[in-house]
Structures are given as structure tokens and as C-alpha cells.
Image (cartoon, grey):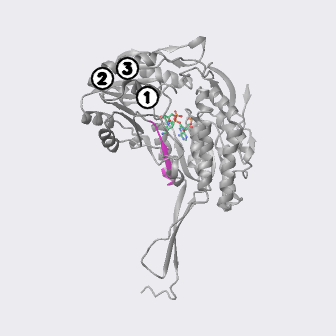
Amino acid sequence: MQTYSYYADGKWLEPANGEYFETENPYTGEAWAQIPRCNEKDVEIAVQAAYRAHHEGPWGRMNPSERGAMVRRLGDAVANHADRLAEIETRDNGKRRVDIHPGLTSWLIDSFYYYAGMADKLEGSVIPTGRDEILNYTRHEPFGVVAGITAWNSPLLIAIWKLAPALAAGNSIVLKPSEFASASTLELMKALEEADLPSGVINTITGFGAEAGEPLVTHERVRKISFTGSVEGGARVAGLAARSIKSVTMELGGKSPQLVFDDARLADTVHGVCGGIFPPAGQSCIAGSRLLLQAGIYDSFVEKLLEVAKRAKLGDPNDPHTSIGPIANKIHFDRVLGHIECARQSGATLACGGNAVNPGGATGWFIEPTIFTDVTPQMPLARDEVFGPVLAVMRFDTEEEALQMANDSNFGLAAGIWTEDHRRALNLANRLEAGTVYLNNYFDACTQSPVGGYKQSGYGRENGWEGMRDFLQTKSVWLSTAREIPPPF
Ligand code: NDP
């Protein structure tokens, strides 16, 4: 069994209390590595290192072009170690290997390259005050030490969405990955050492939310928190951060609707809808987990949907022919099965799936792609995030009804519209309460385009210029050229 250290101040360290916890491979269900169980003492080491790096070391004063060149080298380091990073991400959280490399890694590399190019373009403005003797201008400045707290479903992607803009903006960072999938973030630290950034600019502490996460959130030297996780976790973190008025970005859960109209192209739409939830076993924040079907195509669509869903091959996430991998951890596996049981009892019709399975004798945590029809808007399955391979199918008659049903949710992360009527598509895109809207596609994203939530799906944005702005604060500077300051009274 492999034993990891945590990473702070450019060093690999043992946890202060000497304790470790096991992490499991969801394909086999077996423990494969020991992860440091950090506490507030380790948080102190990491945050102080990050503080020194920003305030005393060269990082905070670095020429921005030079800083950009360093951030670009982080992208090169990910490229050099992409195979290893993909191997560990798959082993630790069960994500399909092909989805990480080459699927994801080019995106991770691009994130560093994209924000590297922004590092020396953070221009302020000269403000037209209307007063000749006054020069008022703005500067975009880093916060100093920022914390990045990440979820288990896509640890590398989520970490890099925070790392790249935070560093390019001139901050130093302490990451805290999920207790369920910390290994790939530690491997990322190993890879990034190759870029030779000053010590303390990047740090990763591991451990549990209450023991390692909370001391990080409440540490007085941390001035910004970028959090990705559940609504419950986000509410707790935002509450703690509010006590010392810290800036917070929240990337939280979703229950995203896919609206399919009678005129949609049937086969393409079925593929898009299935692809919008099942390949990551539903463990994506933007999974299109509510399917709203117009009455005229309801039956034919469901028939085709079942045909495609039943074709999915569950199995080894390392196998390029596997369509759906395991659920990432046992606790979540039990939670998803609980949602399925609850949906059964609330009167929805189980049209396919619903079972835990062991494809090819695998001993890990697999759940069949599951589709419930006859779901009504009041049922828990229509309202709660399952974060598993479970699709809730509902019926509507009119465009207005579809819109009302889609917006009838506490969440607002993403939405999909499938129709050949572009007037309708654009009109609905304007009226849907969601941070991302897909028209005749689903799941697209890129470094340049902002993502984030409406309503309880969060606030702030990642990716694009807005992702950079979340790691900057604006200073307004006033200079007077007046020869005299008149007496105030
Ligand atoms: P959690 O909220 O349970 O945990 C997220 C992170 O927060 C983990 O690192 C966790 O540590 C930490 N944490 C939990 N409690 C605290 C606390 N009190 N103080 C500090 N840190 C804390 O979410 P999950 O990991 O279960 O992630 C799944 C959720 O993430 C889903 O709802 C999903 O939709 C959402 N998500 C949102 C995305 C987006 O971009 N909007 C992207 C990906 C996922 P620990 O694991 O040790 O508890």
C-alpha cells in the first residue's frame, strides 16, 4: 500500500498527529493508499508558507510576464505527467481513463496556458472623474493567500480550475481535496514541482472537512475561498467565511433539466440526453438529471432512450470500451441506492436499471443506468440531487409549462433545450434560471467560457475572464495635482 505525504512550503511532510486514512479504488472496493489526516497544525504550516511566499518571497512582487511564464510551465508539467495523473485519478475515483487522458488533460494544460497569458494583461482603468486636478485609476490586485476546497468527482479538473487563475492573478494557494479522492491532487503537486515555482506558492493539505477544511476556511491569513462541493458543505463554509468577511466563490450542486420538444431530432437528442448523464455515472455537477419530454414524443422517446441506456457497458474504468465506470466511493454508492429506493416508494415507474451490479465480477461499486418515468415535480427524485446514474423523466404539454417545470428547482447550474425551432430555443435560453444553457447539445465546456450557478447552485464563476476576476480585488487610487488643499472649514 502506498503512503502519501502532504505538500507545503515546497516540502513533503508527515501529518502533525502522525495519522493517515485509507483511500479505496472504487473498481475493486479495496484500499490502495494512505492519505495524511491533517489537522490545524498542518493547516498552519501550509497557510504560513503561502503567506510568506506571497508577502515576503518573490511571488508577490514578481514581474507579471515572468509569473505568466511560470504558470505556463505548470501546463507543460501536466503535459509531461498526463499518463500518471490519469492513472491515479482513475484508480482513486473511478473516472474513465479515456475521459481524463486525452479527454481532460489537454483541457487542464490549456487552463494553465490560458491564464498564463492573462497574467500580464490585468490592466486597470483611468476613471473619468470630471476633475482635471484628480487622477483616479484602478488596479487589479491578488488577495494574497487563497484556499481551494474541491469535490471528489473530478479532483484534477476542479483543482486546476482554481490553481491556474489564482496563481496567474498573483495569489498563493492552499488546496484541500476531498477525503474520498485526494491522491491525484497530491500526484499533481509532484508533477508541478517540475515547474520550479518558489516554495509555498502551491500547497496541498489533505484530510477531513471538519479537521482540515475548517481551520483552513477560518484561518485569518486566508482571504479568499473557492469552494466546489455540495450545497450543505457550501453553506457551512460560507457561514464560517462570513465570520471574518472572506470573499467566497461557490460551485455547488445541480438538478439540471433537459427540455425536449416534439420537433427535436429523435436519435441525436437521445444520444445527447444519455451522454449528458450516464458516462460519468451521473457524478457530474451539470448532469442533465431531469428529462422533460413534450407529450407528442414522450412514448417514442422513452422507447429509444431505454434502448440506448441498456446498451451501456459497465466495467473497468481503465478499459477504453467501458461506457460507465463505478460510483466513486462506498458512502455515495449507498446514498444513490437510497435515492433509487425512495423514488420507487414515491410512485415513479422504474423503466430500467435500479440495481447494484458487479460487471465481469468486479468487486467495486457499480449501479446500472437507471431511468424512472412518470415522475412528478413534487417527488424527491425531481427535486434532490442524486449525483448518480439516475434519470427522472417528466411530461409537459406547452412551452410555458416546460419553462415553469424547469425553473421549479432550488438549483440553477445548467439546462439543455432540444428543438429545431431556434426562436423557441433562444427565447427559453433567456428565461431559464441556469448558469449554463445548452441548445441542441449538452456537456460542452472550455477554459475560455465561464461556468457557475444560479440560485443554490452557487455564485461566482470559474473559467474565462470571470474566473480570473474571482481571484482579484480592485483598488481605486486617487492622486491630486492641485497646488493647494483648501481648508475643510
Ligand atoms: P462536499 O460538500 O461534501 O465536500 C466538498 C469539499 O468540501 C470536500 O473537500 C470536503 O472535505 C470539504 N468540506 C466539507 N465540509 C467542510 C467544512 N465544514 N469545512 C471545510 N471544508 C469542508 O461535496 P462532495 O465532495 O460530496 O462533492 C459533490 C458535490 O459537489 C455535488 O453536489 C456536486 O454537484 C458538487 N460539484 C459542483 C461542481 C460545480 O462546478 N458547480 C463541480 C463538481 C461537483 P471532505 O471530503 O473531507 O468532507
Give the camera-side residue of 125 and 14. 125
Nearer the observer, 181 or 233: 181
Q: Inspect the magenta stretch and tell me whether residue 177 lies in it.
A: no
Across and down, in percent, residue 367 comes to 50, 18
Residue contact between numbered discs 2 and 3, judged by CB atoms under 8 Å: no
Region in magenta = 242-253
Work out whether mark 1 precedes mark 2 in sequence or the reverse, and give the earlier one. Answer: 1
| Residue type at the position of mark 1 | Gly
For the point 32% across and 38% down, which residue is it? Answer: 407
The answer to whether marks 1 and 3 mark residues whose Cβ atoms lie closer than 8 Å is no
Q: Position of residue 430 (x, y in %)?
A: 33, 45
Q: Amino acid at mark 3?
A: Phe
- Residues marked 1 and 2 touching at CB (< 8 Å): no
**In the image, residue 306 lies at what x, y percent?**
40, 17
Question: Which is more N-terminal, label 3 or label 2?
Answer: 2
Q: From the viewer's perspective, tell me whether residue 16 is left or right of residue 116.
A: right
- Judged by depth in the image, the label closer to the viewer, 1 or 3, is 1
Q: Which residue is mark 3?
A: 372
Q: Is residue 177 visible?
A: no
What residue does disc 1 label? 272
Picture quadrant of residue 438? top left
Question: Dividing the image into 4 quarters, which one contains the N terminus?
Answer: top right
Mark-to-mark CA distance, 2 and 3: 17 Å
Q: Amino acid at mark 2?
A: Ile
Q: Label 1, label 3: how many angstroms apart (C-alpha)?
A: 18 Å
Dot 3: within a 10 Å radius of its alpha carbon, few (fewer than 14), some, or many (20 or more) residues? many
Image point 51% across, 70% down: which residue?
A: 137
Q: Is 466 in front, or is 297?
A: 297
